[in-house]
Amino acid sequence: MKLSISEARKRLPELVRLVRKGNGAKVEITVHDEVVAELRGTMPSPEPGAAASKLLSLMRKLPKHRGRRTNVSNRINDYLYGTAGTKR
């Protein structure tokens, strides 16, 4: 629904009730036929800790061992400069 700002001021309580009911209602407020604002209901907030529990469940699905372990810090020059190393 598109309304001018003056009409939205007059009907604000009605618009708030409409948006509060839900049903995906959205009110666009216009100034000189250009949409400048949108009035819609809030999204339900997730319960505390939902993101952390989702991350933990994804981590449990990962394989325990993803290949041979390599101590990179002992062989840093090989990784940076190749197995021949640098020639001085």
Image (cartoon, rainbow, N blue to C red):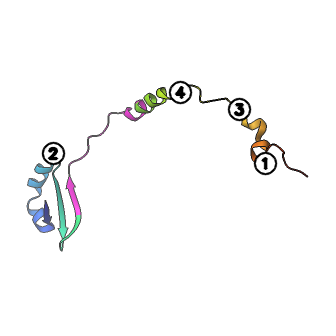
* Residue at the extreme right: 88
User: Which residue is found at the position 40% from the left and 32% from the top?
Assistant: 54
Labels 1 and 4: the sequence-earlier one: 4
Q: Report the span colored magenta.
A: 37-53
Secondary structure type for disc 3:
loop
| Dot 4 amino acid type | Pro
- CB of mark 1 within 8 Å of CB of mark 4? no
- Which residue is under mark 4? 63
* In the rendered image, the vertical position of residue 32 relative to residue 84, given as above or below: below
Q: Mark number for residue 22?
A: 2
* In the rendered image, the vertical position of residue 8 relative to residue 61, given as above or below: below
Using the image as rendered, state which of residue 17 and residue 51 is in the foreground: 51
Residue 40: x and y, percent? 20, 52
- Which residue is under mark 3? 70
Labels 3 and 4: the sequence-earlier one: 4
Labels 3 and 1: the sequence-earlier one: 3
- Which residue is under mark 1? 81
Residue 75: x and y, percent? 78, 38
Labels 1 and 2: the sequence-earlier one: 2
* In the rendered image, the vertical position of residue 75 relative to residue 67, given as above or below: below
Tell me the CA gap for discs 1 and 2.
Answer: 62 Å
Tell me the crowding category of disc 2: few under 14, some 14 to 19, or many 20 or more residues within 10 angstroms, Cα based. few
